[in-house]
Amino acid sequence: MTKLKLGFLASHGGSNMQAIIDAINSGDLDAEACVVVSNNSESKALERAEKEGIPAFHMSSAAYPDSDELDRAIAMTMIEHNCDLVILAGYMKKIGVAVLRLFKGRILNIHPALLPKYGGKGMYGNNVHKAVIAAGDKESGPTIHVVDAVYDNGKILSQSKVPVLEDDTFETLAARVLEQEHILYAKTLQEIVDGNIKL
């Protein structure tokens, strides 16, 4: 069987990307990391890609002042590397029209809360964990969903629940949710490979 070919978009640490790569390397995920694109030239994600021998590119408004041109360049990079899926791993930019069109239904994101709650514009990173704690919710956890033109709106593929403890700060909750993110992303991708999750 041909392996699922993954292209990554990451802005900062790329720890979710690394967890997926580790799952590939250990044989737990039947996929191949084909390319990494980051909008941040100093992102750890680019370092990780280089260390793993994965083609990596810095693509941002620095080289592409026109956002449509940048979007097309990212789309073409994914196509040139034969990607089946585009995996967002902490990518802090809105996905452009060309990528959305060419990879419709094949762009995945991980969100650090149980969607559809706590999604939408501005709901990323610690903002999400702060909102969960402020609301007094008893559980949170990551959601993997298909990306469309609206933030955090696409079809939900999988979720993992994490209890919110009485004494949680946004940092302690974030750390526990991140642990589950690292497990859930690779597991969900393998479920796609096995045909248990249909895109």
Image (cartoon, helix red, strand yellow):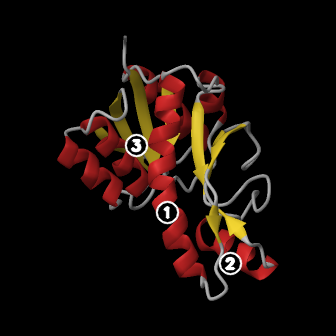
Q: Write down the quadrant of residue 169 in the picture.
A: bottom right
Q: Which residue is mark 3?
A: 37
Relative image position of residue 109 (x, y in whole percent): 58, 45
- Mark nearest the camera among 2 and 3 is 2
Question: Who is closer to the viewer here, 178 or 61?
Answer: 178
State the CA–CA distance, disc 1 to disc 3: 22 Å
Identify which amino acid the numbered label 2 is placed on: Lys
> Mark 1 or 2, which is nearer the eye?
1
Q: Which mark is residue 178?
A: 1
**In the shown orientation, is residue 111 left or right of residue 155?**
left
Looking at the picture, tell me which residue is in the foreground, 30 or 8.
30
Comes first in the chain, label 2 or label 3: 3
Residue 134: quarter of image:
bottom right
CA distance separating discs 1 and 2: 15 Å
Answer yes or no: do the residues labelled 1 and 3 have beta carbons within 8 Å? Answer: no
Query: Which residue is painted at 60% across and 37% down in the image?
Result: 68
52 displayed left or right of 102: left
Q: Which mark is residue 130?
A: 2
As drawn, the residue found furthest toward the top would be 1
Answer whether residue 156 is visible to the viewer in this image: yes
Taking the image as shown, residue 180 lies to the left or right of residue 141, namely: left
Marks 2 and 3, how far apart in space?
29 Å
Please say if 35 is above or below 37. Answer: above
Element assignment for label 2: helix
